[in-house]
C-alpha cells in the first residue's frame, strides 16, 4: 500500500469515527431520544417540542462547537510542527497554553479583587495576549539555539515557569477566584448556544482556510521529508542560511566547518607545476598554434609531444634511481 493510499485510508477511518461520535452526542444524554426523534428534530418535523429543543438548542450547538474547536487545536498543532520542523511541537509542549492560563489568572484575580466582573471576551483577549507573549519568547529563544530538541526543552521550561507563577498567584487569591480559574482551565461545552458557535466560526473558519491554503513550498517538502533536495538545492540552501553543507545535512554541529571531499567541494588552491613541466606545456601550446583550445585538446596534444614523453621518461628514471624507487624494484624482483 502506497503512502497516499495509507493516508486516504486513515482519513476515511477518522471521518467515520467523527460521524459516529457526532451522532452519539445527539442520541445519548440525560434524556434518551430515539433515532427517529433526532432525525425528525433535525429535519424540522418533530412533534415533541421538548425533544426538538433538546436537539436544536442544546446538543447540536455543543457538537458543532466540539468539531470547530477540535479542528482549531489540530490546526494549531500542525502549524507549530511545520514551523519548528518538530513532530512533538504543540501549544502545550511549547508553553503557549501555560502562558494563556497565566494571563487569565492575573486578569481574574485583579478584576475580581476590585469587584469587577470579567466577561468571556475579556478572558479570551487575556488568553490570546498570554499565548502571544509565550510564543514571542519561544521565537526569541529559537534565534539562539541550533537544535530543535533544545528549543522544545526551552518551551517546556517556559510552560513550567508560567505554571509556577500561576500557582503563586492562585495561592494568594480568594476561594471563589480559584474555583472560577479552575473551571475555566478545565473547559466545558455545556451551555453552548448558536451565538457561541457563530463567534467561534468567525475566528476558526478563516484561520483554518488560511492554514490549509498555505502554498506547498519546496522548503516545506524538504522539512517534512516528502522530497529530498538535490546537491544543487542543498548548496543554495546552505548559501541562503550562511552555513556549510555538512551542517545543513546534520553531519556536524559546526556551521562553519569545511565541506568534506564527499560533497564534491574541493578547496580551490593554485597548483604550482615544476619548471620543466611548464616549459614542455608551453612548447606544446606554441606548436598547436591556438592558446584558446580546451584543456582536453591541450592534454591530448601534450601526450603526443616528444618533448613531454622525454620529460616523463626522465622523471620515471629519476624516481627509480632514488632510494624509494630502488626499494620498490627490490620488492618487485623478490616476487
Image (cartoon, rainbow, N blue to C red):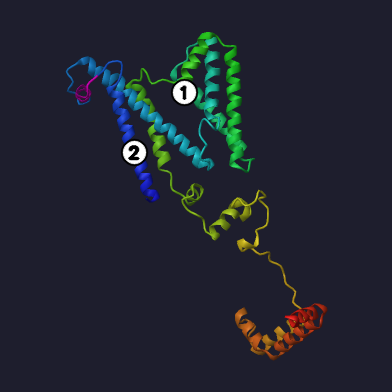
- Considering only vertical position in the picture, is 68 above or below 212? above
Is disc 1 placed on a helix, strand or loop? helix
Which-is-in-front pick, marks 1 and 2? Answer: 2
Q: Is residue 100 left or right of residue 17?
A: right
Image coordinates for residue 220, horizontal then vertical, percent? 48, 48
Helix, strand or loop for the magenta stretch, by majority? helix
Which residue is more in the foreground, 325 or 42?
325
- Considering only vertical position in the picture, is 85 above or below 169? below
- Badge count: 2
CA gap, disc 1 and disc 2: 34 Å
Which residue is more in the foreground, 325 or 40?
325
Residue drawn 63% across the image and 41% down it: 145
Return the residue at label 1: 124
- Considering only vertical position in the picture, is 43 above or below 227? above
State the extent of the magenta-drawn residues as a range: 33-41
Q: Is residue 145 left or right of residue 202?
A: right
Which residue is more in the foreground, 35 or 94?
35
Image coordinates for residue 149, horizontal then vertical, percent? 59, 39
Image coordinates for residue 167, horizontal then vertical, percent? 58, 18
Q: Is residue 40 magenta?
A: yes
Is disc 2 placed on a helix, strand or loop? helix
Residue drawn 32% across the image and 29% down it: 21
Return the residue at label 2: 13
Q: Residue furthest bottom?
A: 306
Say which quadrant the C terminus sits in.
Answer: bottom right
Image coordinates for residue 104, horizontal then vertical, percent? 52, 20
Assess disc 1: are there few (<14), some (14-19) or many (≥20) residues with their C-alpha within 10 Å of its C-alpha. Answer: some
Residue drawn 38% across the image and 45% down it: 7
Amino acid at each position: 500500500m502506497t503512502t497516499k493510499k495509507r493516508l486516504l485510508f486513515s482519513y476515511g477511518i477518522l471521518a467515520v469515527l467523527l460521524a459516529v461520535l457526532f451522532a452519539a452526542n445527539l442520541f445519548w444524554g440525560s434524556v434518551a431520544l430515539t433515532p427517529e426523534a433526532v432525525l425528525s428534530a433535525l429535519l424540522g418535523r418533530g412533534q415533541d417540542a421538548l425533544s426538538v429543543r433538546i436537539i436544536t438548542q442544546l446538543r447540536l450547538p455543543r457538537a458543532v462547537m466540539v468539531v470547530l474547536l477540535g479542528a482549531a487545536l489540530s490546526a494549531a498543532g500542525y502549524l507549530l510542527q511545520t514551523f519548528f520542523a518538530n513532530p512533538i511541537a504543540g501549544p502545550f509542549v511549547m508553553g503557549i497554553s501555560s502562558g494563556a492560563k497565566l494571563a487569565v489568572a492575573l486578569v481574574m484575580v485583579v478584576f475580581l479583587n476590585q469587584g469587577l466582573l470579567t466577561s468571556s471576551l475579556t478572558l479570551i483577549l487575556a488568553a490570546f495576549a498570554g499565548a502571544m507573549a509565550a510564543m514571542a519568547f519561544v521565537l526569541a529563544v529559537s534565534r539562539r539555539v541550533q537544535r530543535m530538541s533544545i528549543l522544545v526543552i526551552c518551551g517546556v521550561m517556559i510552560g513550567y515557569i508560567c505554571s509556577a507563577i500561576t500557582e503563586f498567584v492562585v495561592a494568594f487569591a480568594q476561594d471563589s477566584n480559584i474555583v472560577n480559574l479552575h473551571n475555566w482551565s478545565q473547559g466545558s461545552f455545556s451551555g453552548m448556544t448558536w451565538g457561541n458557535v457563530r463567534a467561534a466560526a468567525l475566528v476558526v473558519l478563516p484561520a483554518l482556510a488560511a492554514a490549509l491554503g498555505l502554498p506547498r513550498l519546496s522548503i516545506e517538502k524538504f522539512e517534512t521529508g516528502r522530497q529530498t533536495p538535490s546537491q544543487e538545492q542543498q548548496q543554495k540552501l546552505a548559501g541562503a542560511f550562511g552555513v556549510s553543507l555538512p551542517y545543513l545535512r546534520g553531519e556536524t554541529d559546526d556551521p562553519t566547518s569545511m565541506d568534506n571531499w564527499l560533497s564534491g567541494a574541493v578547496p580551490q588552491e593554485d597548483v604550482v607545476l615544476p619548471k620543466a613541466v611548464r616549459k614542455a606545456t608551453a612548447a606544446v601550446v606554441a606548436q598547436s598554434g591556438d592558446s584558446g583550445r580546451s584543456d582536453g585538446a591541450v592534454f591530448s596534444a601534450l601526450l603526443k609531444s616528444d618533448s613531454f614523453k622525454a620529460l616523463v621518461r626522465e622523471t620515471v628514471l629519476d624516481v627509480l634511481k632514488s632510494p624509494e624507487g630502488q626499494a620498490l624494484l627490490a620488492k618487485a624482483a623478490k616476487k
